[in-house]
Image (cartoon, helix red, strand yellow):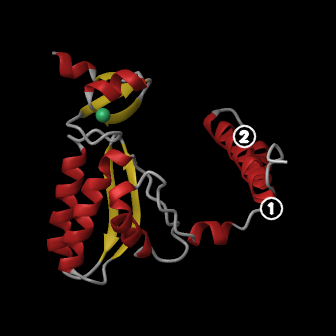
Amino acid sequence: MSDHPEPDELREEALRAAAHDLAMAAWRGDATREELIAAIEAVRQVPIDIERMVNALHVPEDAGEHEAALRALLERIPDGWGRWIRCGAGWYRILARLEERLRTIDPDYRVHQIKEKFGTLRFYWTGRNYAVGKTAVADAETESARTCEVCGSPGCLRTRRGWLRTLCDDCANTEGYEHLPDDDE
Ligand SMILES: [Zn+2]
């Protein structure tokens, strides 16, 4: 019985496949407008309740001791933005500290997006005392640039086939990432 996937899993599989096809169509420089539209339509036709998924609270399974802080951050994301934290567990400690700082600056601050981009943390938010909060956010983003995104040890920016991540030596080895060429000179 357990070999049979649940309807939710089937739908997620279909969504992944359609999204993959769309990404490939968008990635290829020579896809025609019709091919792109067909790929977008295929994603739209997957019978999945996007609104329910987007507004659900996606507390990361590996949140560990930072679960309460991450949940608090996700609860500050308004409907429609998608309540996900799109970065590795190595930065959860940074996020927990930032949540604490921002909460004291403005108890009602809102979060729009939390993600990794170009190897560092990006934290999009709004609130009162924005200038003060901005410093707290900048501190967190700066700290992410020297913290391994996987394990939280000291790290630096690495590359693998054009992708950038901040990693420690061990995690870089495991993930096949190398120092940026400029770092060696
Ligand atoms: Zn690491």
Residue for point 30% across, 49% down: 91
**Residue with the mark numbered 1:** 47
Give how far across and how far down residue 73 sits, in percent. 37, 69
Mark closest to the chain's N terminus, 2 or 1: 2
Number of numbered labels in the structure image: 2
Q: In which quarter of the image is residue 160?
A: top left
Residue for point 64% across, 41% down: 23
Give how far across and how far down residue 148 sits, in percent. 28, 38
Cα separation, mark 2 vs mark 1, equals 17 Å
Q: Is mark 1 on a helix, strand or loop?
A: loop
Neighbours of disc 2 within 10 Å: few (<14), some (14-19), many (20+): some
Quadrant in the picture for the C terminus: top left
**Residue with the mark numbered 2:** 21
Residue for point 30% across, 25% down: 170
Q: Assess mark 1: CB under 8 A from ligand 1? A: no
* Whether label 2 touches label 1, CB < 8 Å: no
Residue for point 77% across, 48% down: 14
Q: Which of marks 2 and 1 is in front?
A: 1
Rendered view: 110 above or below 65: below
Instruction: Give the amino acid type for the residue marked by disc 1 in the picture.
Output: Pro
Q: In which quarter of the image is residue 120?
A: top left
Q: Is mark 2 on a helix, strand or loop?
A: helix
Instruction: Give the amino acid type for the residue marked by disc 2 in the picture.
Output: Asp
Rendered view: 154 above or below 74: above
Give how far across and how far down residue 74 sits, in percent. 43, 69
Q: In this view, does 174 lie to the left or right of 16?
A: left
Give how far across and how far down residue 144 sits, in percent. 25, 47
**Quarter, ligand 1:** top left
Q: Nearer the viewer, residue 137 or 32?
A: 137
